[in-house]
Image (cartoon, rainbow, N blue to C red):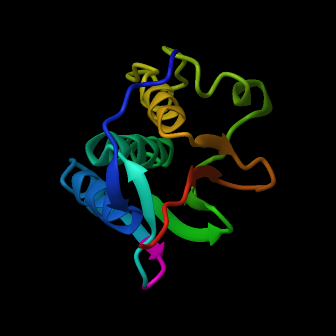
Amino acid sequence: SRPIQTEREKADLREVVQAALERIGRLEGADAVETGTNLPSEPVFVAADREKLTRAVENVLRNACEAMGWRGRVEIGLTVEADRVRLSISDTGPGVSAEVVGKLFDPFFTTKPDGTGLGLSIAYGILEGHGGSIALDASRSAGATFLIDLPQMSKK
């Protein structure tokens, strides 16, 4: 897939996360998923197409919820590292098998009987279009953690 073109403006990544959480919260079954956030108190600015970036985060959150069967906990963290920001999305699901890891972001690849295989692929394209990246943190023994890195904008 090719990167998705974006119209960028200054956006607080904390607000993007909250908007994605609100959208997921409106879905059937979402009330059985606990969420926790560890977000900075100060704004974390990125140059973003706010709607597309919200969709990317929403797709990763939806993937986590579906992997857990809409039962469990999702933790979202946001840290600033020099000129980059890192968003982590962790779930308490079954994790990702070694044979699946290399295919996670491929269009139309899914392990779910009713999935389209587009959610993570679309998120990947949107994040690449923002100069960012997404990867699975394979260091966890249970559940899954996706790491999203984006360039940070100046606070000015």
Q: Can residue 42 be seen in this view?
A: yes
Position in image of residue 6 (x %, y %): 36, 33
Task: Residue at 60%, 41% (x, y): give it.
Answer: 134
Q: In this view, does 144 lie to the left or right of 15?
A: right
Asked if 4 appears above or below 29 in the picture, the reply is: above
Judge whether residue 40 is colored magenta: yes
Q: Is residue 91 visible?
A: no
Asked if 50 appears above or below 75 in the picture, the reply is: above
Task: Residue at 49%, 49% (x, y): give it.
Answer: 68
Asked if 139 appears above or below 127 in the picture, the reply is: below
Task: Residue at 72%, 31% (x, y): give it.
Answer: 101
Position in image of residue 36 (x %, y %): 45, 73
The quarter of the picture where residue 105 lies is top right
| Number of residue marks | 0
For the residue pair 153 and 90, the one nearer the viewer reads as 153
Task: Residue at 49%, 67% (x, y): give it.
Answer: 154
Q: In this view, does 140 lie to the left or right of 39?
A: right
- Direction front: furthest residue: 156
Judge whether residue 57 is colored magenta: no
Screen quadrant of the C terminus = bottom left
Position in image of residue 104 (x %, y %): 62, 28
* Magenta-tinted stretch: 36-41
Position in image of residue 129 (x %, y %): 48, 32
